């Protein structure tokens, strides 16, 4: 009995001990998170700037930005430069076309979700035409016959529904985003068929090549912009934050204002 | 139903109105942008060397762009805390930074076309949309915010983002990381101008 009680006593002491450890761990984590989070300033004008920036996790985001820029200078920029130097323009265009075309299903469902039939029709036709006449997306035939490329993603769709953006985030490999668009990015990946197709070594390596080449190509087109930004801005992190959030809002506004009819213009 | 109808009617009226103003009756703001744009394009398209072009553009910018207003906006809440000397120093540096940014865009082009495509009213002033055609390059869609009397350019939009707001974010972030010291910003701007080539 005693020993059992002892046992229980020991057990509960152990439990208590774990609880204390867990508690202090949680506290430590919280304080760690606390340092990753900027507290709102007291001064009303500073508070207005703080709210406009929409970036309470700024310390964490800046660390992530520095990781990304470190990778940019050490690896991504040289690779992108080599890509532009080595690969002829028509081939680079084809890589970009394949990426755009194979992303069309996600664009289509986003357009449908936003209730924009004209845009949805455009993305549907682009996918159908470019996958057939455009040889699986190598050539952008759809643009030639009047279905111009446009971007809609699930984050924008949620924006038209009135879902708030949530705080700004910088994620290495993804770039500037926020809670809403980060979730939208994940949904967009789920709506991209290529992510489900590969089975077996050949297709898997093809999928990797597709993703890596697409990323390198997309990135190569922005190298000059990033270089300019780093040269012309005193705090590139903050410049990107402001430009990206405004650009994103303007995309959502453009999607909201797109009331074009589904019939062709000449009809 | 009534709602949809009135919205459609309003949209129709709006479309008719914008079409009307866009083509037939230009507003003072669109006239201003057309004349300023044509003067700029005339300099850019001339056969003078690039350095000479940059010199010729300078008075046009000083006359038509509200440089000190934009500069004040970009300093944000730190404008009030800066001493008059710091403000003067900052404005003269900002003037050079802005001029450098714009003249960098000129390049060695010829055959540039410019036309105003429309305008709308915003709280900050009239928003005038213009298209710039450069040979062998994609068309650039530019939006200028025009306000004040006499009319001047107070902001420009690129990719849906207000450039003066981006700049303000840049400066105020730099300042808040340097204890709000406007002298630190001024020396950073001076460094930027010295490194400019």
Image (cartoon, coloured by chain):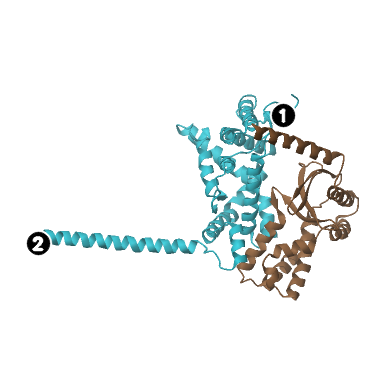
Q: Pointer 2: what residue?
A: A2
- Quarter of the image containing the N terminus of chain A? bottom left
Q: Which residue appears farthest toward the front when viewing the image?
A: B2
Q: How many labels sit on residues?
A: 2
Q: Which residue extends farthest left? A: A1
Which image quadrant is residue A121 in?
top right
In the rendering, what colour is chain A?
cyan
> How far apart are labels 1 and 2 at the CA level?
88 Å
The chain letter under disc 2 is A
Q: Nearer the viewer, residue B129 or A75?
A: B129
Q: Please identify, in this view, whether the residue under mark 1 or under mark 2 is nearer the observer.
A: 2
Is residue A60 visible in this depiction of the protein? yes
Q: Does residue B154 sit above or below A80 in this rendering? A: below
Front-lying residue, A185 or A196? A185
Look at the numbered discs 1 and 2 and tell me whether their residues touch, using CB distance below 8 Å.
no
Q: Is residue B196 visible?
A: no
Q: Residue at the location (48% across, 35% down)?
A: A204
Residue A230 rendering spot, x and y as whole percentages: 66, 58
Reading the image, the residue beneath label 1 is A144
Chain B: its colour in the image is brown
């Amino acid at each position: 009995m005693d020993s059992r009680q002892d046992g229980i006593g020991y057990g509960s002491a152990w439990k208590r001990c774990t609880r204390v450890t867990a508690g202090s761990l949680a506290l430590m984590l919280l304080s760690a998170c606390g340092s990753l989070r900027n507290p709102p300033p007291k001064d009303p004008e500073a508070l207005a700037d703080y709210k406009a920036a929409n970036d309470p996790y700024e310390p964490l985001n800046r660390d992530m930005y520095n990781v990304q820029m470190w990778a940019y200078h050490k690896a991504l920029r040289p690779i992108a430069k080599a890509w532009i130097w080595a690969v002829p323009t028509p081939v680079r265009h084809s890589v970009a076309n394949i990426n755009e075309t194979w992303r069309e299903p996600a664009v289509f469902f986003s357009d449908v979700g936003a209730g924009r039939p004209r845009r949805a029709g455009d993305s549907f036709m682009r996918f159908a035409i470019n996958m057939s006449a455009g040889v699986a997306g190598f050539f952008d035939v759809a643009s030639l016959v009047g279905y111009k490329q446009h971007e809609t993603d699930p984050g924008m769709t949620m924006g038209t529904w009135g879902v708030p953006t949530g705080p700004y985030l910088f994620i290495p490999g993804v770039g500037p985003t926020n809670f809403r668009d980060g979730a939208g990015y994940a949904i967009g990946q789920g709506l991209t068929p290529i992510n489900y197709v590969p089975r077996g070594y050949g297709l898997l390596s093809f999928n990797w090549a597709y993703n890596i080449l697409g990323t390198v190509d997309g990135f190569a087109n922005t190298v000059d912009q990033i270089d300019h930004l780093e040269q012309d801005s005193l705090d590139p992190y903050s410049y990107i934050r402001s430009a990206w959030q405004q650009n994103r809002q303007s995309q959502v506004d453009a999607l909201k204002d797109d009331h074009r009819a589904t019939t062709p213009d000449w009809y | 139903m009534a709602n949809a109808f009135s919205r459609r009617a309003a949209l129709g009226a709006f479309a008719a109105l914008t079409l009307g103003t866009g083509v037939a009756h230009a507003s003072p703001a669109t006239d201003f942008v057309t004349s300023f744009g044509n003067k700029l394009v005339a300099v850019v398209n001339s056969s003078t060397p690039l350095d000479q072009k940059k010199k010729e553009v300078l008075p046009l910018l000083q006359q038509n762009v509200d440089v000190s207003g934009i500069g004040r906006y970009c300093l944000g809440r730190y404008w009030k805390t800066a001493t008059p000397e710091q403000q003067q120093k900052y404005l003269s540096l900002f003037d050079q930074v802005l001029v450098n940014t714009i003249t960098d865009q000129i390049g060695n082009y010829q055959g540039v076309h410019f036309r105003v495509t429309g305008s709308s009213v915003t709280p900050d002033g009239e928003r005038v949309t213009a298209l710039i055609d450069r040979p062998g390059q994609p068309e650039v869609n530019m939006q200028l915010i025009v306000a004040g009397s006499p009319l001047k350019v107070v902001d420009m939009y690129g990719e849906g983002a207000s450039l003066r707001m981006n700049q303000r974010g840049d400066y105020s972030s730099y300042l808040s990381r340097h204890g709000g010291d406007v002298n630190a910003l001024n020396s950073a701007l001076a460094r930027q101008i010295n490194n400019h080539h």
